[in-house]
Image: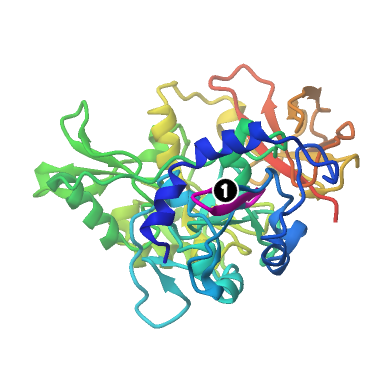
């Protein structure tokens, strides 16, 4: 654990950055602009934890506070406290918990003694070898569980001093460090990374009686079902108390003894239902009948998940047929939520609700009037040829249009690419062919290792809102 005096020093990091960066000029030995040699105090520590390939370069000179030396690397802030025992003198300062106020609500403890459960959080199995080797005295305690970040298309877990992530497209085990140091140093450091800034602080509880009812209901539904809370509960225009979580919106129904239920977010967000279909005979599918022998085919992984998290009265009945995802998984929407299966996700996130609550928090209810145009029933899949690509190599973007699992030719799509240097380029893709697919090669993009290329594919049609799909890939020189 960190002492109170060392935590107090973290509150002064913002000032220390300014003082350290403004007082020194880059070393002539630096390998690239804005980088510095690792100070001799930290050389062995830096190498032990993987050096340049793991921690990234040093981005400030060494500086001191009350006799304690510090130095920023891309992944964090190294600190040396000579007053501690020899094996406890080096550590990464607790930026995430102290500076950014990241400290998620405690996760339920495991029923069986499986995996690692520390500080109220399960340690991601892919991070566990690193944690077991260096421990909380160096990297800090976990302050979140492993989470899916749909905006950045990656899985993440935050510890006090270091953060870990794996891109959706990467194979299990290919975990990297978040740029804590760069986020903290920000514009005060010349060396910059393309990753966006640090996340917002964790939800801060108000401990009202109403909030406690919603939090308890979230716990009862099961770990990960609702996701973390996003906003304090409040009374809505219909006179009902409501609380928004990452995946769902809960509300209290006084007409049924103040029972807590789920809002129908899929329809509120404009997700259109499919027509019921015939049963497909397969061992991995179950069938949910609706009327006249028709209904919806539901993957058994989804039906089992629903049964284990409150049952069909909580999730509601299926409103769409399941759809395959490019990564070999599938997705399906129900009255009150949408589920996803991702075969290469961390174990506790392979089956998870889609973050509809996040979309609702950003955009509110979709009030546009649905019609029967092509876009209502059209499924667009978008992907890149190489999720990791060397700088300057040509990337290919693919898209396909399907309706009721059949290819749709003649669909026109636009493509907008945001490069790491901030330049935005627009392309017009060829209309989809008879197989419903199209592709386009991008101009070669150069960028530093680890930089993100963002792109968005939109359907060219008279629809409101416009149908768009956003993804990204990473420049990576092996």
Residue at 44 percent across and 57 percent down: it is: 144
Q: In the depicted view, which residue is nearer to us: 411 or 40?
A: 40
Task: Please say which color scheme the image uses.
Answer: rainbow
Toward the top, the furthest residue is 462
Q: In the depicted view, which residue is nearer to us: 187 or 433?
A: 187
| 107 horizontally vs 391: left or right | left
| Mark 1 surroundings: few (<14), some (14-19) or many (≥20) residues within 10 A | few
Residue 455 drawn at (x, y percent): 71, 33
Badge 1 marks a residue whose secondary structure is: strand
| 470 horizontally vs 240: left or right | right
In which quadrant is the N terminus drawn? bottom left
Residue 231 drawn at (x, y percent): 31, 38
Magenta range is: 64-75
| 302 horizontally vs 311: left or right | right
Residue 403 belongs to magenta span:
no
Residue 67 belongs to magenta span:
yes
Count how many numbered circles sit on residues in the image. 1
Q: Which residue is mark 1?
A: 64
Toward the front, the furthest residue is 67
Residue 141 drawn at (x, y percent): 45, 64
Q: Is residue 291 visible?
A: no
Residue 53 drawn at (x, y percent): 76, 58
From the image, give the main secondary structure of the stretch colored magenta: strand
**Is 438 above or below relative to 323?**
above
Residue at 42 percent across and 68 percent down: it is: 304
**Is 73 above or below relative to 443?**
below
Q: In the depicted view, which residue is nearer to us: 365 or 282?
A: 365
Q: Is residue 352 visible?
A: yes
**Location of residue 133 by image quarter:** bottom right
**Is 353 above or below relative to 23?**
below
Residue at 65 percent across and 46 percent down: it is: 405
In which quadrant is the C terminus drawn? bottom right
């Amino acid at each position: 654990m960190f002492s109170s005096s060392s935590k107090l020093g973290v509150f002064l990091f913002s000032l220390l950055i300014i003082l350290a960066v403004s007082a020194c000029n880059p070393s002539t030995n630096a390998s690239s602009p804005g980088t510095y040699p690792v100070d001799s105090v930290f050389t062995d520590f830096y190498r032990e934890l993987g050096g340049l390939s793991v921690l990234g370069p040093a981005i400030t000179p060494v500086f001191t506070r009350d006799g304690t030396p510090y130095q920023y690397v891309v992944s964090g802030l190294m600190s040396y406290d000579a007053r501690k025992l020899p094996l406890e003198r080096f550590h990464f300062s607790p930026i995430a918990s102290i500076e950014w106020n990241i400290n998620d609500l405690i996760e339920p403890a495991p029923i069986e003694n499986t995996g690692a459960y520390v500080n109220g959080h399960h340690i991601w199995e892919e991070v566990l070898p690193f944690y077991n080797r260096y421990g909380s005295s160096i990297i800090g305690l976990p302050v979140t569980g492993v989470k899916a970040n749909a905006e950045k298309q990656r899985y993440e877990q935050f510890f006090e001093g270091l953060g870990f992530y794996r891109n959706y497209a990467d194979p299990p085990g290919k975990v990297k460090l978040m740029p804590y140091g760069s986020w903290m140093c920000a514009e005060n450091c010349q060396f910059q990374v393309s990753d966006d800034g640090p996340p917002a602080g964790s939800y801060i509880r108000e401990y009202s009686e109403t909030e406690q009812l919603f939090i308890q209901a979230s716990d009862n539904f099961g770990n990960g079902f609702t996701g973390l809370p996003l906003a304090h509960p409040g009374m809505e225009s219909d006179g009902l108390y409501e609380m928004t979580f990452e995946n769902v919106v809960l509300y209290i129904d006084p007409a049924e003894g103040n029972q807590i239920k789920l809002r129908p977010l899929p329809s509120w967000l404009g997700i259109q239902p499919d027509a019921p279909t015939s049963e497909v005979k397969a061992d991995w599918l179950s069938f949910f009948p609706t009327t006249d022998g028709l209904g919806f085919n539901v993957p058994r992984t989804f039906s089992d998940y629903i049964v284990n998290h409150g049952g069909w009265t909580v999730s509601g009945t299926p409103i769409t047929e399941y759809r395959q995802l490019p990564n070999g998984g599938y997705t399906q929407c129900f009255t009150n939520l949408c589920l996803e299966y991702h075969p290469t996700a961390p174990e506790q996130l392979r089956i998870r609700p889609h973050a509809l609550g996040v979309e609702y928090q950003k955009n509110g209810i979709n009030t546009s009037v649905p019609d029967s145009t092509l876009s209502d029933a059209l499924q667009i899949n978008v992907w890149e040829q190489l999720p990791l690509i060397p700088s300057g190599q040509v990337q290919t973007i693919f898209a396909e249009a399907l309706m009721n699992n059949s290819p749709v030719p003649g669909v026109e799509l636009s493509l907008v690419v945001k490069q790491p240097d901030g330049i935005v380029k627009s392309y017009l893709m060829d209309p989809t062919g008879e197989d419903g697919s199209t592709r386009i090669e991008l101009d070669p993009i150069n960028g530093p290792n680890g930089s993100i290329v963002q792109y968005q594919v939109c359907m060219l049609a008279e629809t409101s809102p416009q149908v768009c799909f956003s993804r990204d890939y990473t420049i990576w020189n092996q």
